[in-house]
Image (cartoon, rainbow, N blue to C red):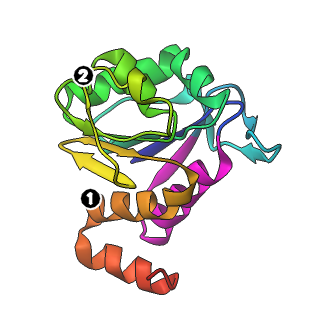
Amino acid sequence: MVYVFLAEGFEEVEALAPIDMLRRAGVSVTTVGVTGKVVTGSHGVPVTADITQDALQLDASLEMIVLPGGMPGTLNEEKSETVQAAIAYCVKNDRYIAAICAAPSILGHCGILQGKKAVCYTGFEKELKGAEIGSQGVVVDGKIVTARGAGVAVDFGLTLVGILLGAEKQAQIRASILCD
């Protein structure tokens, strides 16, 4: 199971592109409304979450969490006790944590980027406490996946497919969407 957190003001493409890539690949994805069942993105697009944060179950079925960026979505995610509990669960249980744009700052504030390679939206680098800042679009370091922003949202999603299902499935999905 992959949980994608949606908080009021999230960056729509950073959430929906990875969801789309993962679901195309057959991965079980559940969207979690942090601020309610219907969550409005930073550009005014309302999205109905599969569940609200009070229904989230942190158990052995969890493979990965995804934190989209956007403002004030990132701030709303970070102040959620449920999101914080999910991050802590992933760290403790060696599960993947993926964050894009401003959202890697949440991981920096939690102290889990210490000694890791990571990227984020330009201007948030100082929030990635202890990280080695890269310049690539998407960076994987152990169980931490970070990405720069909306422009790499499809690549971010395809990277997550590759992590969970392998390079062959990733290539299949990439080809099916005509992504060179």
**Do the numbered discs 1 and 2 sit on residues whose CB atoms are within 8 Å?**
no
Instruction: Classify 175 as above or below 3.
Output: below
The residue labelled by disc 1 is 163
Q: Amino acid at mark 2?
A: Gly
Q: Position of residue 9 (x, y in %)?
A: 71, 33
Asked if residue 62 is positioned above or below residue 81 in the image, the reply reads: below
- Of helix, strand and loop, which mostly describes the magenta segment? helix
Q: Work out whether mark 1 precedes mark 2 in sequence or the reverse, and give the earlier one.
A: 2
User: Which of the 4 quarters of the picture holds residue 146?
Assistant: top left
Compared with residue 76, is residue 16 higher up or lower down, i.e. above or below?
Answer: below
- Highlighted range, magenta: 11-31
Residue 151 image-quadrant placement: bottom right
Where 128 falls versus 6 (above or below)?
Answer: above
Q: Residue at x 34, y 54 (%)?
A: 136
Measure the alpha-carbon separation of dots 1 and 2.
24 Å
Residue shown at 36% from the left, 57% from the top = 160
Residue 5 on the magenta span: no
Q: Is residue 52 left or right of residue 88?
A: right
**Residue 157 showing in the rendered view:** yes
How far from the left and from the top, in percent, is residue 33?
A: 64, 33
Mark 2 highlights which residue? 130
Callout 1: helix, strand or loop? helix
Q: Amino acid at mark 1?
A: Ile
10 displayed left or right of 117? right
Q: Nearer the viewer, residue 126 or 70?
A: 126
Q: Residue furthest right?
A: 44
Question: Label 1: how many residues lie within 10 Å, few (<14), some (14-19) or many (20+)?
Answer: some
Looking at the picture, tell me which residue is in the foreground, 144 or 22: 144
Q: Secondary structure at mark 2?
A: loop
Question: For this view, does 106 lie left or right of residue 71?
Answer: left
| Residue at (47, 24) in percent of width and height | 83
